Amino acid sequence: MVALFVLALLVAAAAGRDLRMDGRWQSYMSTHGKVYSMGEEVLRRAIWEDNVQYIETHNRAADQGEHSYWLGENQFADMTTEEFKNTMNGYVMNPHHQVKDLHVPTISIANDTVDWRTKGYVTPIKDQQECGSCWAFSSTGSLEGQHFKSAGKLVSLSEQNLVDCSKKEGNKGCQGGLMDNAFTYIKKNKGIDTEESYSYSGINGRCRFKQASIGATDTGFKDISRSEDALQMAVSEVGPISVAMDASHKSFQLYKKGVYSERMCSSTILDHGVLAVGYGASDDGEAYWLVKNSWGMLWGQEGYFMMARNKENMCGIATTASYPLV
Ligand SMILES: *[C@@H]1O[C@H](CO)[C@@H](O)[C@H](O)[C@H]1NC(C)=O
């Protein structure tokens, strides 16, 4: 029964294939190193063709000024949005989230524009691969910044250490977690290993933490109250800040450049952890948050994206922000 259904799907997909797109499909597969079995390729091709159509329709509208951002064929262009959400978005919301130790700004006005990358606070773009470990990359990102601020040295920190070892604090490795749980683990554990000593594999593994190779430590964390003004003050004063967002839409899966804004985005149902490294306004005056993602250099603007800022907390970017204390 199931086999018959799959066969029917394959035939339908093969029949719908647009032969003029053969060359483009070959080049898509080679650009992204895609290797499929015979049966799977037919399905992937059909999904990719749908996504290419979605991208081209969106981009034509964006060229006419109807959107502030453009889409592109990235490594997720052969996935349905359902598959994409299930594999990539591992921020597991805490329904009982209570802000405990609140960040209190010591500055009275925030800068107009901030980009911590230019000040040496930010490591190169990383890639979580097919593992829901976004929360670990968001955590290392803000600790890398705070460690640089206090120690004057930028040290890339180990996400795999967090994936393998912070279960007791409530994280679930590739099945998801929370940045604040990671900061708590690092405090209790008296450190986190360097990326170099404990490299990323993207699968759940046995904990191999070694005290001798720690790259940084923290003494807890501060949460930021739920407002874009508070987040702006914190990014201006503190450094890169861990944030969560709703990343469950096809428009984000296929985002390429520009200021992201999605009518369907939720500001309360969040599923992805990322790192706010700055903010500003584009040439045509659109305010944005500058955000580091963990999906490699081929996604977005060489791994980064701009999220609409001061647009009713777009995609929940200011809903559960925090940073580690060092
Ligand atoms: C904010 O502006 C001041 C004055 O121009 C500058 O010294 C400082 O580096 C800026 N801070 C950030 C985070 O860019």
Image (cartoon, rainbow, N blue to C red):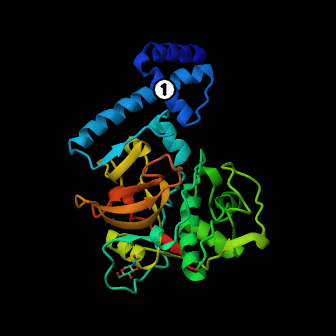
Density class for disc 1 (Cα within 10 Å; few <14, some 14-19, many ≥20) is some
For the point 75% across and 70% down, which residue is it?
213
Decide if residue 17 is on the left or right side of residue 3: left
Of residues 177 and 57, the one drawn nearer to the viewer in this rendering: 57
Q: Is residue 92 above or below residue 113?
A: above
Residue 249 coordinates in the image, percent (x, y): 40, 44
x then y, percent, for residue 221: 54, 76
Residue 72's quadrant in the figure? top left
Side of 208 where 269 appears, left or right: left
Q: Which residue is mark 1?
A: 25
Q: Does the image show residue 46?
A: no
The quarter of the image that holds ligand 1 is bottom left
**Residue 63: % across, % down:** 24, 42
Q: Is residue 267 left or right of residue 191?
A: left
For label 1, being within 8 Å of ligand 1 is answered no
Relative height, residue 79 to residue 179 (above, below) = above
**Whether residue 138 is visible:** yes
Q: Residue 307's x, y, as percent?
A: 36, 57
Give the SS element for disc 1: helix
In front of the other: 194 or 33:
33
Instruction: Between residue 287 and residue 8, name the one nearer to us.
Output: 287
- Amino acid found under the numbered disc labelled 1: Trp
Q: Is residue 109 above or below residue 160?
A: below
Residue depicted at 39% across the width and 62% down the height = 290
Q: How many marks?
A: 1
**Residue at 54% of width from left, 16% of height from top?**
5
Compared with residue 126, is residue 179 higher up or lower down, i.e. above or below?
below
- In the rendered image, the quadrant that contains the N terminus is top right
Q: Residue 150 sits in which quadrant?
A: bottom right
